[in-house]
Image (spheres, rainbow, N blue to C red):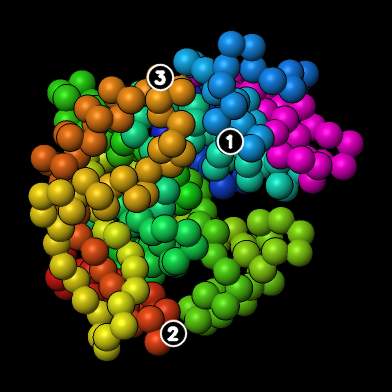
Amino acid sequence: MTKAYAAFGLGIASEIPLPGLLPGIGDAEVSISHGPVPETLEGGTQVELFGWASAGKYLMTMPGHARFLVTTDSVTVEIFPQGEEEMISLLVERACLGILLQLRGFLVLQGSAVELEGEGLAIMTEGSMGASTLAYALLREGARLLADGLVAVKPGKDGMPELYPASSSLQLWNDMICAFGEEPDSFKRVRPGLDRRFVPSTSGIQPTGPIPPGKILFLGKHPQQGILVQEYAGKEKMKALLKCMHKKKLKHSLGTDRMHFSISMMMLQKMRISEVLFPSGSPFCAPDLARTVLEKL
């Protein structure tokens, strides 16, 4: 059964369930379907242990689950006999769509994004350090959800960067859900055996069109007390942006080097990039971080 989704400014028709994306209607520019996928990519280069890339294509294998072929307008999925549906959905939503967006001219970052007073706020981290949780805390303070997992930026018609809505929910760990006074069992698991859940947006009507990205926050830890907020300048801005790029090592093999550089320079000129550090020896407290972000930024 094919379902329609609307994410990153694209209509998507998918035979694979994509529970984290916004529902869509109408024509689709991207198709995600079942089908045979070759074991290697002809004319491509092996760029990862289970990944092959060429200009305009990427082939990825997840042992035990599926093989994926990504192009600018499609994802073909060959599911293995023991493939787990939820894992395959997650790989399509995060890994495959991230690469497809790069091929279509987007700069793709790892993290979450919300809309505050008409501007996009992107929250970046290295690894699972709380971007989704901070985004959820900001939603409870009146922000609107844009994206979780992948944050996609592309120049608009006027050449200015735009951030695109994509997500209907955030993925939160059970302990973080409990910290907000909610019951994890009331939300669907991301996949069996994983203590992580899809938590729907609490922000009412979500943006449907692109939003100008005003700020990027890089979330991290420090050994001192209290929450520290400081703005990056000069080369530090570029270093911070590079840290959170999705599959940045693939850009040369995919043929997206120049696009990456062009959008990155535009964002560095137009956006503020700050880091928000919380004490490494203290429990992660998203509500306190959210209040600090709203007060200082």
Q: Residue at x 71, y 39 (%)?
A: 62
Please name the residue that numbered disc 3 is placed on.
255
Q: Residue 286: horizontal and vertical position, in percent?
A: 38, 75
Q: Is residue 162 magenta?
A: no
Relative to 34, does residue 295 appear above or below in the rendering?
Answer: below
Indicate the secondary structure of the residue bearing disc 2. loop
Instruction: Specify the segment rendered in magenta.
Output: 61-84
Mark 3: amino acid: Gly
Q: Quadrant of residue 183?
A: bottom right
Please name the residue that numbered disc 1 is placed on.
48
Q: Residue 264: horizontal and vertical position, in percent?
A: 23, 36
Indicate the secondary structure of the residue bearing disc 3. loop
Q: Mark 3 or mark 1: which is in front?
A: 1
Mark 1: amino acid: Glu
Q: Which quarter of the figure is the C terminus placed in?
A: bottom left
Relative to 84, does residue 200 appear above or below in the rendering?
Answer: below
Looking at the image, do the residues carrying marks 3 and 1 touch, with CB atoms under 8 Å apart? no
Mark 2: amino acid: Pro
